[in-house]
Image (cartoon, rainbow, N blue to C red):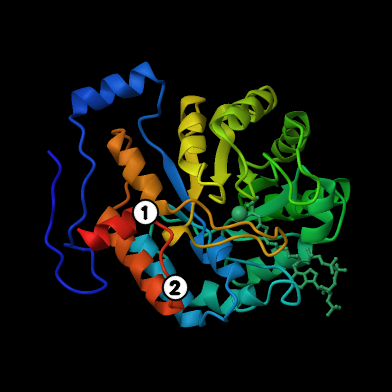
């Protein structure tokens, strides 16, 4: 039975009217096995990094820290906290060290950070990061615009990061951007995506996140791309990272789950975009992903009302409307 709870006050969903997608466990099990869906999905929350890197106004450090803490309280197992990139390129992330030092690390939660090169990796270590992510692309022009080097040059830089990370025993996640389209080159070949994913995986990345950076993909394109990538990288090591520009993200994620993927990146309140991918809107909203997964009987460990509170907090702080349909609907209930 769907449960409706009373909303107690502005900004609080902890005991608010959140419609709970309910499914009896037998029905959920049948649904999962008939469509090969995973029993559990790991959600990688990227809002504090992917979301806030794209804000026009400077977000105060204490707001970022509070957001990260609320997300860890909501049960997110991985929260990408910030990035150690050039402050000239992405001023919004220039307080990365303060963010890392200020957040209240919760046991069992990982707080990875982006590191484009050795300089970024060393700064991340100094600030206490325990996991990093390197970020490449399947498009030459995007790579040049985003990190100022070709795809091959980026892979050489990432190898340096990987060697240093191995010495420190630090796990490294890898991103491939523009897997379903590029803002500068248009169509991107699934084989190119597979090639870059394979190189990152062979280098030692434990997980490869496939980024639809500008949210142009459809379930058809996602299936084709995953078929190519799965020939090179075990599906257990794949994640999907869907921006929702064309409203296809949830459909694309569902198709990825049916293809065996069980790690999904998302951003609270649907914040985000990439400063070097014009027109790209935010990631799919974490609230909407959690709602869909719970409705499929898939475990996430995430407390939806607490997550809605985190979304409400950041939207109030930024004075903007949430992009999460679930949050919008829950406010009206
Ligand atoms: P560069 O200018 O080519 O670097 O930038 P450089 O090595 O020539 O150095 C130039 C200056 O930058 C020097 O300082 C360096 O010290 C400094 P100066 O002597 O001029 O004072 N520098 C750094 N400073 C701080 N941290 C560093 C660092 N490295 C060099 N790590 C660089 C190359 C990669 C640094 C630059 O292009 C950059 O920072 N780009 C930002 C990229 C970015 O953050 N993009 C957004 C994230 S990616 C994304 O959103 C996609 C994703 O979500 C997946 C998806 O959606 O597809 C992950
Ligand atoms: Mg992104």
Asked if disc 1 and disc 2 are in contact, CB closer than 8 Å, the reply is: no
302 in relation to 235, above or below: below
Q: Position of residue 170 (x, y in %)?
A: 62, 53
Q: Earlier in the sequence, mark 1 or mark 2?
A: 2
Query: Quadrant where the C terminus lies?
Result: bottom left
Q: Position of residue 44 (x, y in %)?
A: 48, 50
Q: Quadrant of residue 90?
A: bottom right
Q: How far apart in space, not on screen, are marks 1 and 2 (Cα)?
A: 14 Å
Query: Residue at horizontal 71%, vertical 37%?
Result: 197
Judge left or right: residue 52 versus residue 13. right
Q: In this orientation, which residue lies closer to the viewer: 305 or 68?
A: 305
Q: Position of residue 215 (x, y in %)?
A: 60, 47
Residue receiving disc 1: 325
Residue receiving disc 2: 320
Mark 2, residues whose alpha carbon is within 10 Å: few (<14), some, or many (≥20)? few
Judge left or right: residue 183 versus residue 289. right
Q: Is mark 2 within 8 Å of ligand 2?
A: no
Q: Is residue 225 visible?
A: yes
Judge left or right: residue 263 versus residue 279. left
Judge left or right: residue 327 versus residue 183. left
Query: Residue at horizontal 21%, vertical 55%?
Result: 18
Q: Is residue 76 visible?
A: no
Mark 1, residues whose alpha carbon is within 10 Å: few (<14), some, or many (≥20)? some
Residue most extreme to the top? 34
246 in relation to 306, above or below: above
Query: Residue at horizontal 77%, vertical 43%?
Result: 186
Under circle 2, the secondary element is: loop
Q: Position of residue 115 (x, y in %)?
A: 69, 60
Ligand 1: which quarter? Answer: bottom right
């Amino acid at each position: 039975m769907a449960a409706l709870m009373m909303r107690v006050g502005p900004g609080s969903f902890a005991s608010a009217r959140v419609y709970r997608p309910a499914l009896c466990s037998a029905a959920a099990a049948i649904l999962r096995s008939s469509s090969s869906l995973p029993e559990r999905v790991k959600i990688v929350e990227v809002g504090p990094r992917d979301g806030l890197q794209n804000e026009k106004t400077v977000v105060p450090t204490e707001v970022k820290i509070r957001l990260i803490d609320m997300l860890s309280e909501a049960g997110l197992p991985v929260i990408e906290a910030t990035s150690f990139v050039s402050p000239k390129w992405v001023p919004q992330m220039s307080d990365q060290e303060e963010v890392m030092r200020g957040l209240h690390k919760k046991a069992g939660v990982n707080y990875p950070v982006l590191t484009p090169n050795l300089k970024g990796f060393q700064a991340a270590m100094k600030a206490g990061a325990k996991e990093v992510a390197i970020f490449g692309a399947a498009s030459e022009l995007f790579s040049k615009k985003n990190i100022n080097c070709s795809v091959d040059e980026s892979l050489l830089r990432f190898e340096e990061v990987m060697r240093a990370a191995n010495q420190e025993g630090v796990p490294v996640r890898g991103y491939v951007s523009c897997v379903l389209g590029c803002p500068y080159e248009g169509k991107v070949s699934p084989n190119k995506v597979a090639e870059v994913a394979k190189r990152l995986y062979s280098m030692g990345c434990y997980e490869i996140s496939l980024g639809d950076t500008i949210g142009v993909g459809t379930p058809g394109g996602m299936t084709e791309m995953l078929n190519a990538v799965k020939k090179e990288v075990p599906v257990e090591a794949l994640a999907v990272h869907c921006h929702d520009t064309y409203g296809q993200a949830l459909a694309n994620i569902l198709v990825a789950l049916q293809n065996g993927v069980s790690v999904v990146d998302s951003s609270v309140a649907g914040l985000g975009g990439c400063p070097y991918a014009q027109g790209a809107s935010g990631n799919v909203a974490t609230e909407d992903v959690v709602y869909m997964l719970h409705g499929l009987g898939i475990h996430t460990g995430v407390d939806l009302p607490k997550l809605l509170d985190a979304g409400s907090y950041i939207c109030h702080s930024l004075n903007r409307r949430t992009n999460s349909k679930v949050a919008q609907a829950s406010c009206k209930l």
